[in-house]
Image (cartoon, helix red, strand yellow):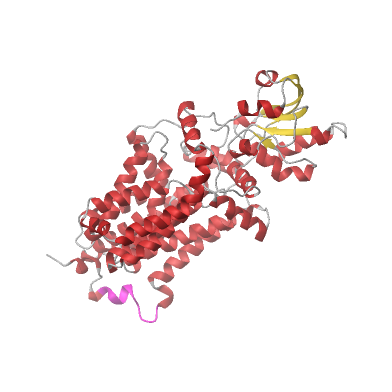
Amino acid sequence: MPSAVAEIEVPAHEAAFDVPPRARFWSGPAIVFYIAAAKLALHLYAARFYGYFADELYFMACSRHLEWGYVDQPPLIALIVRMERMLFGDSLQSIRLFAALAGAGTVLLAGCIARELGGKRFAQALAAVAVLVAGVCLAMNHYISMNAFEPLAWAGCALILIRIIKTGNQKLWLWFGLTAGIALENKYGVVFFATGVVAGLLLTHQRSVFLKPWIWLGGLLAFLIFLPNLVWNIQHRFPFFEMLANIRRSGRNVSLTHLQFLGQVALHMNPVAVPIVLAALWFFFTHPQGKQFRVLGWASLVLLAVIMFSANGRPYYVAPAYPMLFGAGAVAVEGWLSRLRLRWPRPVYVSLLLIAGTIGAPMAVPVLSAENYLRYTQWLHFSPPPIETDRLGPLPQFYADMFGWEEMAAEVGRIYNSLPPDVRPKTAILGSTFSQAGAIDLFGPKFGLPSAIGLNQSYFLWGPRYYTGESVVVLGLSREELEGYFNSVEKVGNVGHPYAMPYEHFPVYYCRQPKISLAQVWPKLKKWS
C-alpha cells in the first residue's frame, strides 16, 4: 500500500512540471496571491454599481451609535464601518473596501490551508479558484456586512487547528480563542463552527486536548472578548432571540426540505465545486494523511446538520466552511491525479470552474446593468432562488434592495421642506424599517432633513428622541395603523423605484394631533423582525 506522502506528493518525473526552476512567480503561494488580487479587483470594480444595499444603510447608522451590541448583531461591524467612513468617506467604494479585502484574504487562507494539509502548487491554486468562483462568496464580499468577514474568521480558526494538530503546540489554542472571540463579536454564527469543532474533538483521539489547560484558556479568552456583548444582551433581555422568534412566527424565510436545502448549498458554492467538497470529506475520513485532521470533517458535518435542522437556518450559513473544505478537497484531488499520472484533467477542471463561475457571477455581483441583468437571466432561463417569502419585483431581493433609497429621501425632503418653517424643527421622520430610516440618515442632509427615528431593530432602542408626535412624516406604515395613534393622517406623497422590492412602494403620510405622546406609544411600535 503506498504511503500517505506518496499519495499526496507529485512523482519525481513530474517535479519539474510542478515546481520549475527559478519559478518563484509561479509557485503555489504566488498563484494564490494572483487569484486573491483578481477577486479584490472584481469587487473594487463592481462596488460602484447599483446603490447602497439595505443592510449597509443600517450598518452606517449603527456606526453613528457605537455600542457593545445591537438588536440583530454584535458590535464589530459598526466599528468596522465607522473606521471606513472616517478613513475613506461614505461612498460605495469606500464602505465596501474592507469587505473586498476580506474576500481576498479568504482566498489566501484557502491556499494556506491546502498547503498546510500537504498540497502542492495545483492544490493551492485549485482551493483559491474554488473560493473565487463560489457565488455565495462573491455575493458576501460585494457589500459590507458581517457575512463578508465570517469565512475569513472560520478559515483562520481552521488553519490554527491544523497547525495545532501538526505541531502538537497546545499554546496555539490561545490564538484559536482570540480568533473565535473576535469572530463572535462579528457574528454569532461562529457558534455553529465551534460546536462542530468540539464535537469533532470528542469524536476523535484529539479529545485528549481537554485534559490540558490550553484549550480551556483559549475558550476563556474567547469568552472574555465576547463578554461585553453578552453583558449588553443581558441588560437588554437578549433582543436577538426575540427577533429570531418573531422571524420564525412570521414565516418570512422560505421553507425548504432537506433535499432543497442541500441543493441550494451546492448552488451557492458553485455546482462544479461540489466534487471538491466531497473529496474533502473523503480526505478527512479515509485518506491516511487526512485522518489526523478528521476533527475538521466531523466539524463540517455537525455544523451542516445543526444549520439544516435549525428553525432559522439558511443555506448560506454553511458558506464560511467552504474555504476549509476547498483546501482539503483540493489536496485530495491533486493526490488522485498525481497517482494516476494525469495532467490534462487539471486545466480542464479549473476551466470548468471558471466557466461556471463566470456564468453565475452576474447573479452574485452587479457587473451588468439592471436591464442587461434581466435580459441575461431570461436568456439563461434561471434566476437565484428566493430566500424570503416576500413578493419580488423584476430583480431578486439582493439586487432590488440596492435601488430607490436616495429617491425616497428626495421625496421625503420635498414633503418636509413644504412644511411651515416653525413646524419643521418639531417634525419627526419615522421609518418602519431600518433601511428606510438609514436612507434618511445617509441621504437626508442633502435634502435638508434631520436624522430619522425608526421602529425596526436598534433604531427602536434609540427611541423617539425629543419628538412628541405633534408632527410626523411616516414611511412604510398603513393608514389604518396610523389612525390608531393620530387624529390627523394625511397622504402627502408616494415612494417606489421600479426596481425596488414591492414592499418599498408605499404612500407617505403626514400625521398630527397624536392621541398620546410618541414617548408613551413607543413601546407598542417595536418591530423586531
Q: Is residue 123 visible?
A: no
The spot of residue 161 in percent (x, y) is 33, 60
Rendered residue at 46%/36% (across/down): 385
Residue at the far bottom: name it: 22
Quadrant in the picture for residue 340: bottom left
Q: Is residue 301 left or right of residue 523?
A: left
Residue 522: horizontal and vertical position, in percent? 65, 29
Q: Residue furthest left?
A: 1
Relative to 165, does residue 480 appear above or below in the rendering? above
- At horizontal 38% and vertical 62% (from top left) the residue drawn is 174
Farthest right residue in view: 421
In the displayed structure, 502 sits above or below 480; it is below
The quarter of the picture where the N terminus appears is: bottom left
Viewer-proximal residue among 373 and 476 = 476
Q: Is residue 486 left or right of residue 221?
A: right
Picture mark count = 0
Give the percent coordinates (x, y) of residue 439. 68, 41
Q: Which residues lie in the magenta part?
A: 14-23
**Viewer can see residue 175:** yes
Q: Residue 466's spot in the image, x, y percent?
A: 74, 36
Q: Nearer the viewer, residue 480 or 71?
A: 71
